[in-house]
């Protein structure tokens, strides 16, 4: 019998993930070569303090958006409140760049007023109207936020203060991202609202739903006034807990003025009036 046939040993194939990794590395190398060719002095620019990386500059040239240098933030880098050993990390895409891409300016419209004054109704109507105009807006509703972020808070004076502090910080983040932020909170204490105003700055627009208690109680969409009058709810704003009216709100919605006949105007009419003010203030373009 003859010798068995010779079989060539098959070369083992590389696993698929190795091939994908090699392809990615080759593509990255080609991209790096393009960037180097387009920006031969990039290394020197970065060393001199230029905050925009070459890759980001190439992206800007392709999409036609100029990225601004991050604004300097004057904070104590290593101690903020009760936190220590922390440092603010500034990103490469600042607010002005985001706003230009969205063609709007971030702001906080803070709807305040008694329960039943129409805050959320007007806020959601306004959100819809802005969306129809191609704008990016988001409502932060007091009841909705208590389902999650603020679910561990009650209605004591201390908890109400923390409730507003938290949503104030969230609304500032939204506004800094270029979002038109519609905050609907009773926020009964003037001091708490003023602290949010101080944090947000010129982007803060207070919308006071100046609806009389008797009108809100007559409407009572959630049955809360009836329960409060019956003693089933304690510390209810307007009944046995105070509401401190804004002293200088940018926008005031009143029954007599808005309805013209002593009634509350349709929310669509109120939303349209607020949109006019936003246009005048320059928030609907960038």
Image (cartoon, rainbow, N blue to C red):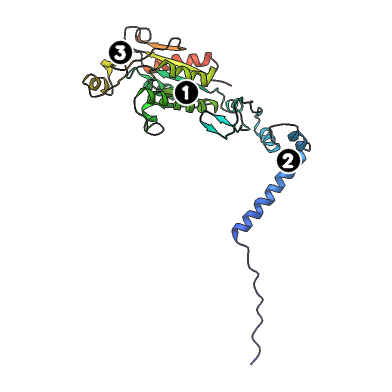
The residue tagged with tag 2: helix, strand or loop? helix
111 or 232: nearer the viewer = 232
Disc 3: which residue: 213
For marks 1 and 2, the one nearer the N-term is 2
- Mark 1 touching mark 2, by CB under 8 A? no
Disc 1: which residue: 130
In the drawing, does residue 242 fall left or right of residue 166?
left
Circle 1 Cα neighbour tier, 10 Å, few/some/many (<14 / 14–19 / ≥20)? some
Q: Quadrant of residue 52?
A: top right
Measured Cα–Cα span from mark 3 to mark 2: 65 Å
Looking at the rendered image, the quarter that the C terminus falls into is top right
Q: Quadrant of residue 96?
A: top right
What numbered label is drawn on residue 166?
Answer: none
Q: Tell me where residue 267 appears, x and y as whole percent.
A: 37, 18
* Visible residue check, residue 283: no
In the drawing, does residue 23 fall left or right of residue 183?
right
Measured Cα–Cα span from mark 1 to mark 3: 30 Å
| In this view, the mark in front (1 or 2) | 2
In the drawing, does residue 226 fall left or right of residue 24?
left
The residue tagged with tag 1: helix, strand or loop? helix
For marks 1 and 3, the one nearer the N-term is 1
Disc 2: which residue: 35
Circle 3 Cα neighbour tier, 10 Å, few/some/many (<14 / 14–19 / ≥20)? some
Measured Cα–Cα span from mark 1 to mark 2: 40 Å
Circle 2 Cα neighbour tier, 10 Å, few/some/many (<14 / 14–19 / ≥20)? some
The residue tagged with tag 3: helix, strand or loop? helix
| In this view, the mark in front (3 or 2) | 3
* Rendered residue at 23%/18% (across/down): 229
Q: Tell me where residue 248 appears, x and y as whole percent.
A: 46, 10
Looking at the rendered image, the quarter that the N terminus falls into is bottom right
As displayed, is residue 84 above or below residue 190?
below
């Amino acid at each position: 019998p003859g010798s068995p046939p010779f079989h060539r040993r098959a070369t083992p194939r590389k696993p698929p993930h190795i091939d994908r990794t090699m392809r990615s590395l080759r593509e990255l190398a080609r991209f790096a070569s393009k960037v180097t060719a387009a920006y031969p002095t990039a290394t020197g620019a970065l060393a001199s303090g230029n905050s925009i990386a070459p890759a980001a500059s190439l992206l800007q040239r392709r999409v036609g958006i100029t990225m601004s240098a991050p604004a300097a933030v004057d904070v104590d880098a290593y101690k903020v409140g009760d936190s220590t050993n922390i440092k603010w990390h500034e990103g490469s895409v600042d607010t002005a760049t985001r706003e230009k891409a969205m063609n709007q300016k971030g702001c906080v419209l803070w709807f305040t007023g008694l329960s039943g004054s129409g805050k959320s109704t007007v806020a959601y109507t306004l959100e819809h109207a802005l969306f129809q105009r191609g704008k990016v807006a988001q409502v932060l509703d007091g009841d909705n936020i208590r389902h999650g972020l603020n679910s561990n808070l009650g209605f004591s004076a201390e908890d109400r203060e923390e409730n507003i502090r938290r949503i104030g910080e969230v609304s500032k983040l939204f506004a800094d991202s270029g979002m038109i932020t519609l905050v609907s909170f009773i926020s009964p204490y003037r001091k708490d609202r003023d602290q949010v105003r101080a944090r947000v700055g010129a982007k803060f627009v207070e919308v006071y739903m100046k609806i009389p208690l008797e009108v809100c109680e007559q409407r009572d969409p959630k049955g809360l006034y009836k329960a409060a009058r019956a003693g089933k709810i304690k510390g209810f704003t307007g009944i046995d807990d105070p509401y401190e009216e804004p002293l200088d709100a940018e926008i005031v919605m009143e029954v007599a003025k808005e309805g013209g006949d002593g009634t509350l105007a349709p929310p669509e009419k109120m939303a349209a009036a607020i949109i006019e003010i936003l246009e005048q203030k320059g928030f609907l373009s960038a």
